Image (tube, rainbow, N blue to C red):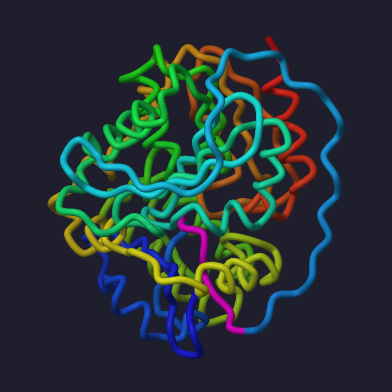
Amino acid sequence: MYGPRRIGSVTCGIPPFAPRRLTWRQARTENPMRLPTICIPLALALAACAQPAAREQAAAPAATPAPAASVALAPGERRIKASDGAELYLKVAGRGPVCMLIHGGPGQGSLSTEKMGADKLEDFLTMVWFDQRGSGKSPDAQDYHLDRVVQDFEDARQALGVDKMCLIAHSFGGILAVEYAKRYPQHVSKLVMANTTLHFLGPENSRMQIDFVNRVLGKQAVKVAADADDAALAKARDEARAALMKSGNGYRFLSETTDSIKVMGEIDGGYARSRGFGNAIFDENAKYPEYMADYTADSAAVTQPVLVIAGSKDYAVGPDEHKRFRFPNQKVVVLDGGHISYYENNAEFVGAIREFMAER
């Protein structure tokens, strides 16, 4: 993800009213463990330069997914053209019903999710590891509006020749997946919402993180009025992040240990990644206000079966964020872990999806 003084996969979740808003480019030049504001409560990387510790992943419990009508896709990497001419990267691997990853960030890319244990889904799913425009191996583009990004998923579906696919969303990707499912319900079979949010950097997130920091530090490091408006909440949240980072515990928004962050850093730092999506959302946030809206109400329009996977110690999106969701046909699984459940709780994560996909 970065060298000794570089963060390559970090997206800085600092709203426009923050007292100091780091751009992505500024964040890459600073020591991540000393940042005055914590970069990304919702992206998948905070940082550590050390070599990753070895980690064994338990095998997922055996189960046989229910038969599903799906086209046999040729495995391998490919590049397709979106309807506006932008180039998009994807990789097909596995067997079974077709599922597309909707990664988080914004701008994270799919590779670290795939390589940190989510590739075990390929045992029973045909996974489409898709990099959103300006993310991972998909080049930067001109347009990053929500409508355009959601259309990219539809363009990819058509290019693959798939009638229906399931969506597996992580973190910020939850907003994108819900919007796709709402606009193209006829092409979505099921939806997995893993450690997702439907209100990116909203006031709920601010209060949750402020409370969390005060608990970790054992004192009321940051005070905020009960009737504080969104701007005041965001300012207090940034102060809380800075305090936790200064204490050396900034990684705890994502995980209880630095292990998963180190592993992610090694993977994301191992190739040249596009960063246009993240740059656009955070450096030009006034141009893309739709990403800061609350999409909770939209979840009520998604009638397909939905598996919600939450982390009891996920202080990026919040351990209770999933309780705001309104999917009419949802199943909730709460794992004893943080934001990166596909790695830290791999056996349970894969097992829950395997069981969900087997349900008729």
Instruction: Report which quarter residue 150 is drawn in.
Output: top left
Point out the residue furthest to the top here.
Answer: 360
Does 41 lie within the magenta span?
no
Along the viewing direction, whichever of 307 and 337 lies nearer the viewer: 307
Region of the chain picked out in magenta, as a range: 42-49
Point out the residue furthest to the front here.
Answer: 74
Indicate left or right for 138 with 120 as reference. Answer: left
Indicate left or right for 51 with 200 as reference. Answer: right
Residue at 25% from the left image edge and 71% from the top image edge: 19
Q: Is residue 78 visible?
A: yes
Q: Is residue 229 above or below residue 300?
A: below
Residue at 29% from the left image edge and 76% from the top image edge: 25
Residue at 63% from the left image edge and 73% from the top image edge: 262
Instruction: Report which quarter residue 225 is drawn in.
Output: bottom left
Q: Is residue 244 visible?
A: no
Along the viewing direction, whichever of 232 and 196 lies nearer the viewer: 196
- Identify the image quadrant of the C terminus: top right
Report the magenta stretch's main SS. Answer: loop
Does 43 lie within the magenta span?
yes
Indicate left or right for 220 with 124 as reference. Answer: left
